[in-house]
Amino acid sequence: MKKEFKAESKRLMELMINSIYTNKEIFLREIISNASDAIDKLHYKSLTDRKIKVKKNDFNIKVDVNKEARTLTISDNGIGMTKEELENNLGTIAKSGSFDFKNENAKKENIDIIGQFGVGFYSAFMVASKVEVISKAFGSEEAYRWSSSGIEGYSITKAEKENYGTDIILTIKEDEEFNQYLEEYTIKNLIKKYSDYITYPIKMELTKSRPKKGKDNEFEEYKEVEVINSLVPLWKRNKKDIKQEDYDTFYSDKFFDYEKPLTQIHTAAEGTIEYNSLIYIPSHAAYDYYSKDYEKGLQLYSNGVLVMEKCADLVPDYFSFIKGVVDSPDLSLNISRETLQQNRVLKTIATNIEKRVKTALLEMQEKNLEDYLKFWQAFGMQIKIGIYNDFGANKDKLQDLLMFYSSKEKKLITLKDYINRNKDYKDIYYACGNSIDQIAMLPQVEAVTDKDKEVLFCTDYVDEFVLKTLMKYEEKEFKNVCSDKIDIDSEEEKEKLNKLNEKSKDMLDLIKDTIAVKEVKFTNKLKNHPVCLTSAGEISVEMEKVMNAMPTNENINAEKILEINEAHPIAKKLEKLYQNDKEALKEYSKVLYAQARLIEGLPIENPTEITNLICDMIAK
């Protein structure tokens, strides 16, 4: 006799099949999880009732593919169901025997039940035209068959079954797209993907081939039962029992990386929130890492069952390079078990992972600098962007991870290194450019390094934006040596220079008006160079170049200052021209300004005019 489902409407069943689950292949995960729950219940009862004589080693889940009959059968030797339980658990959508069992035993220890929603079973109808459940409750003499072809309803009849437990028989739909679920290879891979860490053996009879006896060129097929799943995941094993080779092999197999990771972070957290995690820091960036196609995230498990391939909420953007797994029984999953409800548990786990990754990187920086330099080469840009993004909200978390090239050390150093050996410095000096060699040749850099000051070289486009975001490190301000704010002169030198600029004010104003800059002044900080450009205000010349290279219509201009070397012969030449030929002074001013722009890597606004002026000067 066919019965109607006890849900409010047939539409609810349609939602179960067509809307809640977005990925058809998870049906096998759900059914295997239910089988694991059934075994858990019997195992738990055997621990609390001495009359029940079953051993944990006897428990298993069997998966059988029958291509000819188009059936896929999943069997367990768990607690089984009575006729009433079949009626209640399978005849009512969203009625969960596992959920009831967990609630009944809520005060008892260590009960991990996976299937708590009572809808996972119905995902079978995504791939099956008919579902049969033959079950025999432990201790009962009778078995029953629950059968349904979907929303039309179900029937329950008596059945024959030798042993306790449950067999779920799926008749796979005839459409070609479902044929894959009758292939041993596909089913084996789905078990490995979603249910590899179910704590009971998942056995499957697989078709294999071997050479025929006495006939080397001929093969015969035979069947062999194989345990498909790994049972105990690496992240749940005791760290002292795991070799480095085990960690590296797991990483290579799980994340398909041909290079060993730099390090791993293995955590077993207990207390208010329980979770296990195994996080890896790769030695190189993925081929698409800095592209928009890259997806961050960690594999997320709940009690050993894969819930999400990439859970982005567990990883901040600035640590998006990490790979690994997180497994927690405390996660609040949604009804389809495919996504997470946003909750305190998830945020707490994410915060803990973030702290542990930072700690691991700082330890690497201190104890294994060679590996840290590999990390920095691969992911340093991501750390810098992390500081600059979100208006600097994360700058305090990330600043100690930064590295810059040192003019003294001739290698990458941290900000802490810089501070520790320059405690007498009032500021932290830096300079920006396209390359280390180009920065080293800047007149402004030479002026500072000649006074035995250490300068940090910034070669990435984002570097100065990062330092502007930081503003300070350990109370020392960042100062661009190409800024007019640099103060490395003695009081006597400053006074002498101020007098010279005041004396030459009219000439300098004429030059300023000719080339349209914020200011023109003499300087004593240029060694052999005649001129240089510095900037006033918050926008430097390098920042101007970066922002104007972006695909926007903005035209950003730094406030530029032309500085003239007061000790260079050009200074006397300019004074002479001011006295005798102001038009010639203007021409010289244009050439000097063009020279200063070229040194800074800026384009010349009117190259034809400048080249003609240079030719005229050479010809005289």
Image: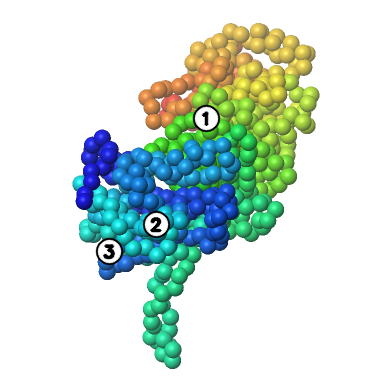
Q: CA distance from mark 3 to mark 1?
A: 45 Å
Closest to the camera, between mark 1 and mark 2, is: 2
Q: Do the numbered discs 3 and 1 sit on residues whose CB atoms are within 8 Å? A: no
Q: Secondary structure at mark 2?
A: strand
User: Identity of the amino acid at label 2?
Assistant: Lys
* Residue 231 in the image, given as x and y percentages of width and height: 53, 57
Provide residue 610's location: percent of width, then percent of height. 47, 27
Residue 73 visible? The answer is: yes
Q: Position of residue 349 (x, y in %)?
A: 56, 36
| Of marks 3 and 1, the one in the foreground | 3
**Cα–Cα span, label 1 and label 2:** 41 Å
Q: Which mark is residue 88?
A: none
CB of mark 1 within 8 Å of CB of mark 2? no
Q: Which residue is mark 1?
A: 344
Question: How far, Cα to Cα, is label 2 from label 3?
Answer: 24 Å
Label ID, residue 70: 3
The tag earlier along the polypeptide, 2 or 3, is: 3
Residue 376 quadrant: top right
Q: Is residue 498 above or below residue 416?
A: above
Whether residue 380 appears in this view of the structure is: no
Amino acid, disc 1: Arg
Residue name at image x 50 percent, y 52 percent: 42
Please state the horizontal and vertical placement of residue 207, each as a whole percent of the image. Answer: 39, 72
Report the mark closest to the observer, 2 or 3. Answer: 2
Q: Residue at x 57, y 27 (%)?
A: 394
Of residue 102 and residue 250, the one placed in the foreground of this image is 102
Q: Which mark is residue 136?
A: 2
